Image (tube, grey):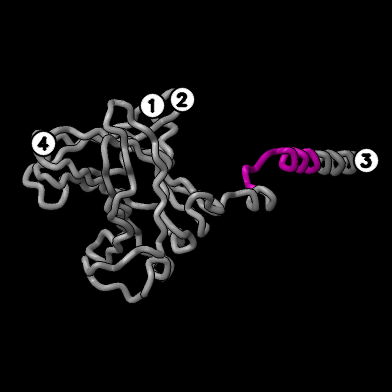
Amino acid sequence: MKRIAVLLGTVLVVLAALFVVIGCDTGTASKDDEEDTPVFVSPVGKGKVTDWTIAKGYENTTALDLIIEGTREDDNGILKVIWSSSMDFRSCEFYALLPEGTDYGAYDGITFKVKLPASSNFLLLMRNPNGGTTWKIWEDYVYKGRDDDELVWVTVRQPFADATEPGWGPASAEPTLKGWLTADKAVQKQINLNPVLNTGGGSAVNTDVVTYFDDIGFYKGSDIEAPDSVDVVWSFDDVE
């Protein structure tokens, strides 16, 4: 009788342990949870200001006041860039490394919001930062700012289809930017949004220019005014 009682006690202990294990959350995502995970995830964290680097632009002899900082506009986080050039054709190098392992060739172009005084354009580049191929996406007037003190936000979208491989670094084996982005997706990419301000000379040279950026990323679709989808890599919503 005593042996039966001991055996019954052992069974009850085992059953209790099983109930505890079944009732606990192991932290492992279910299959349904995995299916809800977005296709595009930015491992660098959206809004990480320190991802971005600023340097003096092409042919500038000095680098004055090159500053990147996060700021807020009402409830929205944005990126504030202060830059200056020593030449009439004023520009700066403004770039960041993109998250690794994404097939950026699945997209159709670059998108970002900008607020900048007067008329300007951007030298947009996608490149291998280790001395590899560089694709030039756009360098033309895409922004018409206001000449008074009020700046206005403009959304810039430029398609990969307009890109050229201008010979900065080794030539690409792929005939298009989309092809290069897909073929070399294992290589980390650098994106340049270099602002250029055509001031016409005079006292504007060596004067600070303040530029604001937001919602930097990529879009899919042939209609740049109404793309099929937009994936934002940097939104800056978490800046203080």
Q: Is residue 59 left or right of residue 170?
A: left
Task: Measure how far apart labels 4 and 3 are at the Cα level.
Answer: 98 Å
In this view, 98 is above or below 187:
above
48 or 165, nearer to the observer: 165
- Mark 3 / mark 2, whichever is N-terminal: 3
Residue identified by numbered label 3: 1
In this view, 55 is above or below 134:
above
Closer to viewer: mark 3 or mark 2? 2
Task: Measure how far apart labels 2 and 1 are at the Cα level.
Answer: 7 Å
Closer to viewer: mark 4 or mark 1? 4
Task: Measure how far apart labels 4 and 1 are at the Cα level.
Answer: 26 Å
Tell me where residue 215 sits by quadrant: top left
Residue identified by numbered label 1: 72
User: Which amino acid type is shown beneath numbered disc 2?
Assistant: Asp
**Which residue is at 30% across, 43% downward?**
52
Q: What mark, if any, has residue 206 been given in the picture?
A: 4
Which stretch is magenta? 13-29
**Which residue is at 30% across, 54% downward?**
124
Residue identified by numbered label 2: 75
